[in-house]
Image (cartoon, rainbow, N blue to C red):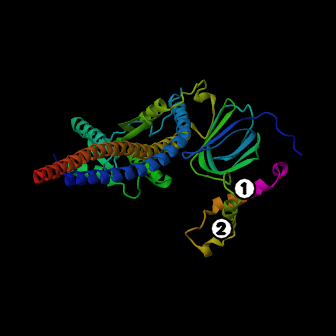
Amino acid sequence: MAEPLRGKFQIILLTPRAKLLDVKAASVVVPAHDGQLGVLRNHSPLLTELGFGIMQVREISGRPDAFFIIEGGFIRVSENHATVLAYEVTTFEGKDKAQADKMLSQAQSAVAGKEYIRSQQHAMDLKRAKYIVQMAEMIQAPADVQQSG
Amino acid sequence: MANTRQILKRRNAAAEISKVTGTMETISAVRYRQYYHQWAEGLAFYDALAQLAFLMASAQTQISHPLMEGSQSNVNALIVIGSDRGLCGAYNADIFRMLETHIKMAQRFGRELHIYAKGRKVLGYLDHLKIAPVKVYEDFGEVPTAEQANAIGDYFTNEYLNGKIGRLGIAYNRFFSAASQKAQTLTVLPVFDLIDDLTTRATVIWPWELQLEDFELSPSPESIFETLARMIIRTSISGCFLEASVSEHLARVISMRNASENADEMIKDLTKAYNRARQSQITVELLDIVSGVNVSNN
């Protein structure tokens, strides 16, 4: 088991439609424009453009880890506040089991290339579908497996 | 005294009107609540954007980017957001007054004015002024989807970068709070003016002790600025449409509520008048009968 991280800091995820997350957590990994970027407590001030990928929020006070697929935006880190501004966010958060399963199976068939046969209209963006499958795996896997793998 | 039947007719007409205005009020109230919720949810995002923008605009090291500089173009672009339907008080009239000011200003300063219109009422007014709009937004009802707003934003940003337009303004009814809405023009391009407006409108004033130089930036400030500028432009455009809709429905709720109240008052008055007329009719008839009986007895 990995040693639990000590200090927590505020993590906020904002979209034009809603405030999706406002929690205290130990670490956040965001998809920066040039690769993954991890932020812990007491990080120096940072302003970075985001790319397309999965944002992972670990060891949140009083709730399980949270994952979001981000499609571009910004992260601003200052004074132990990490604010993520994103336009398009896909997530299982706030969805019930049936909705999440439907999203996942749709993504899986898109990744498997079956979606073309079913219908072009509902075809999911392939990249997003891959990330959805990956995100579902992350939620199931315990954190320490994730970190070593 | 008026005929009882006439009074009844008028009372029924008033009741009809009250029913219609009541329904309109209910519909707009529901829409207003939806849009208001959407607006309130987005506020935190706008504030955070404004803070970033302020940070970039107040940087010590000058960020040079075409979007930051003025344009040589002689064209003013103006998006005018009105409503499709009337019965919303002075909502459209305020926008029209704003539009007229823009036309006069453009004439005075010898600039060309290109109008992009939203809402049938605006089209009607432009027709009255004999001005043809460059484009009419008809592909969305009241508020554009994220993609549509992005398309509008990108269109104007590219026009600006290509030197086709010098300024972009949006004339709309801004929603300050449920108690206050006001027609105003938001200057979107050049971006500097927009940042000015955004930073003054942010509801939370950030106790900002850090400067842009304190931040680790990735990629370069210029590149971040471009993405940020495009993001602000898009967000402001969709935000303006949203605020305009919030204001429109609120204006309609208020004017329809007044109309219903007036109609109800009228119904009350007419009912009183009707009762009085009926009573006097009965009295007259009774007098007739009594005097008739008296005559026959004598």
Query: Amino acid type of disc 1?
Result: Met
The boundaries of the magenta stretch are: A134-148
Q: Is residue A14 visible?
A: yes
Left or right: B49 in relation to B149: right
Q: Residue extending furthest front?
A: B298
Query: Tag 2, which secondary structure?
Result: helix
Residue A141 on the magenta span = yes
> Same chain, marks 1 and 2?
yes
Looking at the image, is A4 positioned above or below residue A92? above
Task: Give the numbered dot on residue A135.
Answer: 1
Q: CA distance from mark 1 to mark 2?
A: 15 Å
* Image location (x, y in percent) of residue B107: 22, 38
Residue B67 on the magenta span = no
Output the chain of dot 1: A
Left or right: B285 in relation to B237: left
Query: Tag 1, which secondary structure?
Result: helix
Q: Nearer the viewer, residue B24 or A52?
A: B24
Where does the N terminus of chain B fall, quadrant-wise?
top left
Q: Is residue B75 visible?
A: no
Which residue shows up at 21% across the image and 52% down it?
A: B4
Q: Residue under circle 2?
A: A110
Nearer the N terminus, badge 1 or badge 2? 2
Query: Amino acid type of disc 2?
Result: Ala
